[in-house]
Image (tube, helix red, strand yellow):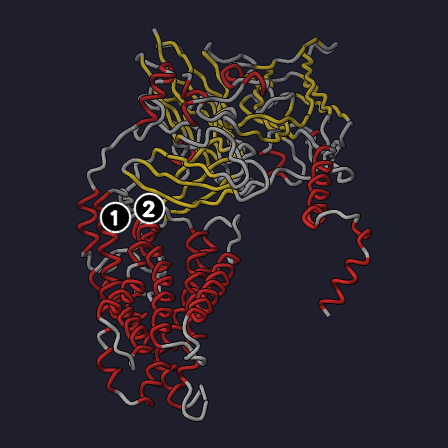
Amino acid sequence: MEARTATERELQPDRTGGLPAWLLGLVPLLLIIAAVGAFAALGGPGLGERRGPPAEELAVEKTVLRPGTIEVTVRNDGPDAVAVAQAQVNDAFVQFSGAEQPIGRLESAKVTLQQPWLEGEAYEVALITSTGGTISHEIPVAVETPAADLSFFGLMALLGIYVGVIPVAIGMLWLPWVRRIPPGWLRGVMALTVGLLAFMAIDATLEGFELAGEGSQAFGGAALVLIGAAVAFLSLTGVSAWLEQRRSAARAAGASGGHLALLVAVGIGLHNLGEGVAIGSAYSAGALALGAFLVIGFALHNTTEGLAIVAPVAHLRPKLGRLVLLGLIAGSPAILGAWIGAAAFNSSLAAFLFGFGAGAIVQVIVQLAPSLRDGEGRTLHPVAVTGLLAGLALMFATGLLVSV
Amino acid sequence: MPQLSRRRLLAASVPALGGAAAALHSAVPHSHPWHSEAQAAEPEHGGHGGVGGHADFRDGRTVDHRANGFDPHEMLRDFDWGTTRRLASGQVLREWELVAAEKEIEVVPGVKYAAWTYNGRVPGPTLRCREGDRLRITFVNGSSHPHTIHFHGIHPSDMDGVPDIGAGEIEPGERTVYEFDAQPAGLHLYHCHVRPLADHIAKGLHGAFIIDPKDGREDADEMVMVLNGFDTNFDRSNEVYAANSIGFAYMNKPIVAKRNELVRVYLVNVLEFDLVNSFHLHGNLFDYYPTGTRRTPSEFTDTVMLCQGQRGILEWRFPQAGKFMFHAHQSEFTELGWQGFFEVVD
C-alpha cells in the first residue's frame, strides 16, 4: 500500500507544480489573511451601517476596600469601548480616580472611589458611562481587604498548611492499617477512595461553574471549567502513558501502586490548588472568617484525601521520604492557591483552575477503577459499591462542616 | 473537598486566624490623594469632593454649557416676556414661538443624553406675562415625535394642549397656536402632554410660566428654579437631580445674592419618577406662597415639599453675608446633584 502511494506520487509530480509541501500548507493561511485585510480595509462591504447604540459591558473582577476608598477593577466584556464618566456609591456622586481613558475591548481598568464606608454595611457602586448607562456592583458586606504584604502571605501559607498539608499527612497515617486488611477489604477502601474523588470532581465542577458566572465572560465563562477539565484529563493521561512506557513491560495490565499513588497525589494537589485559590480570594474579599470551626471542618474533610493516597500503595513498602513527597504534592498546592487567590484573584482563572482540578481527578478515577476488580473481574461488586457510597457520604458529611 | 460558597461563609465563626490578620492589617494610613490634587488644580472649587466635603461630579467638573446652548446661571434670571402689541380692545397681546426639537445635551459631565427640548433648552424658556394679557403661543413641532404644550392655569378646553381636544397632538413638521387670557396671577408651568407622559416630560419638554399680578410684585432679585432630573439609563429612576437641569451647577459656582435685598425664587417641580421633591434653605427662613396665587404667605419655613406639578414662590432677605446652601431635603437627591450655594455679599 505504502509503496503504491509512493509510486503514484512519483508519477504525478506536476499536480502541485513541484512546490514544497510547507508552501502549499501556507496558501490558505495567506489567503485568509489577505481576505480579512481587504475586508477590514473596505470597511465590511455590503454590511451597511451599524444599528443601535454601543453595547457597554463592564464586569467587575475585583473589589478592594481600604479605609476611605473602594477600589473596583473592571474588565470590558463587550464589543465596544466604554468610557466611565462619573461614579456613584449608594446613590451619591463620589470622587474617583482611574479610567481616565475609554476602556477598550478586553482591557481592564482600576477605579478608586472616595467613600467613607462603614464596616459590615452594604454598598452599591454604580459607574456611569458616557452614554448614561450604569454598571452596578454590589458589595454585600464591607470589610477591609487585607494588604498583600509579607505577613499576609505568611498567613495564607499557614492557612494552606492547616487545610491542605496537615490533614493530608494525618490521613496518610492510615497506611499501616490498610496494609494489614485483607485484599477484599482493600478493594472496599479503594472504592471508598474513588467515591471521595468522585465527590471532589463534582464539587469542583460546580464551584467552577459558580465562579465562572461571577466575573467577566469575555474569556469564556463556564466553558473555561470544561476546557480546564479537558486539558487536565488529557495532560495527565499523556503523562501517565509516558510513565508507563518508561517502565518495564512487566506490569502490562493496570498501573502500579506507586504510580497510582503519585497520580492520586497529583490529582488531589491540583484540586487543592483550586481550593486554595477559592479560600484565598474569599478571605481577601472579607467573605471568609477564618474561624477555628472552619479550619477544623476543612481539616476533617481533607484528612480523607490522605487515605486516598495511601490506599494504592498498601501492598508496597514505600520509603518514608516518598510518602512525605506524595503528601506534599497533594497538600502544598493549597498554599500556592491561597497566595494566587489572595493576591491576584480572577474569577476566570479560578474557574479554569477548578475545572483543571476536576479533570485531574476524573483521570485519577479512570486509573484507579481497575484496582476495584474482584477475582471475577467485576468492578461494581457489592463491596465496591458500598465503598463508593461510603466515600460520597463521608465527603458530603464532612463537607457540611465547611458550608456554614 | 471543601465546599467554599463565599456567600454562605460570612463572618459567623470564631475569629482565630482572622483576628490576627485584622490586627496585622489595620494600620493602613488614611489618605485623600484626590482631594489634595484637585484642590491644587482647581482652587476656585473649594469644598467639593473628597471623603468628607460635599458630593460632586468627578474633580468638580461641570458640563459644556456652550455646547448645550444653555447655562443654568443664565437661565436662573432669564425671563422671556415675548413680544407685545396692544390690541384694539386695549388688551396687551403677548406672543411667543416655541419650537420642539431633539437635542443631545450633556446632563452630567461626560454623559450625553438625547433630550427633547422647547427652543433648544431644558427647561424651556420661562414665559412671563401680566395678568389679563392675551397670550398667543405659536408651537412648531420640529422633532420627529408628536408633541403639545399643555399650560397650567385657566384657559378654554380646546387650548389645553392634550390629545384629541382642540388641535390635539401636533405631528412632526406641523404647527399650532395656543391662545388664551393670562389668568390667574401666580406661578404655573407648561409641559408636553403626549403619551407616554413620563418620557415627554422627563426628556425635557417642560418649563415655568409666570403670570404677574396686575399691580406687580415688590422689586426683588428674582430667580426661577425648575426642579428636574434625568434618567440616563432608562430604568425609570433618575441618575442625576438638579435645579435647572445641571446638577451641582450652583455648587461649584454659587448664586450671588446681596445682603438684605429681597430674593424671590419661582420654584417649580417637574421631577419625574420620584413622588416628591423639596427645597431647603440653610441659615435662613422664607415666606412661602403656594402656586403664588395668594398675597399672604402660607408659611414661614426653611423647607417645602412639592409633588410633580406643584410650585410656589419663596421670598426672603439674607440678613448676613456668607455662603448658604440650598438643596433638596431628600439626601439622595442632594448628593445626586440637586444642591447649591447662595453667596451673600454686601
Quarter of the image for residue A181 reads: bottom left
Q: Going by the image, does A19 lie left or right of B268?
A: right
Write down the chain letter for disc 2.
A
> What's the residue at 41%, 63% (across, down)?
A357
> What's the residue at 73%, 32% (across, down)?
B144
- Residue A45 % position (x, y): 77, 37
- Residue A65 % position (x, y): 32, 41
Write down the chain letter for disc 1.
A
Q: Nearer the viewer, residue A55 or A242?
A: A242
The crowding category of the residue bearing disc 2, from other C-alpha atoms within 10 Å (few below 14, some 14 to 19, many at least 20), is: some
Q: Which mark is residue A387?
A: none
- Residue B114 % position (x, y): 62, 31
Q: Nearer the viewer, residue A134 or A3?
A: A3
Q: Amino acid at mark 1?
A: Phe
> What's the residue at 35%, 58% (across, down)?
A273
Q: Which mark is residue A153?
A: 1
- Residue A367 % position (x, y): 43, 75
The crowding category of the residue bearing disc 1, from other C-alpha atoms within 10 Å (few below 14, some 14 to 19, many at least 20), is: many
Quadrant location, the N terminus of chain B: bottom left
Name the element at disc 2.
helix
Residue at the outermost top position: B346
Q: CA distance from mark 1 to mark 2?
A: 9 Å
Residue B185 makes an appearance in the image = yes
Q: Mark 1 vs mark 2: which is more N-terminal? A: 1
Quarter of the image for residue B139 reads: top right
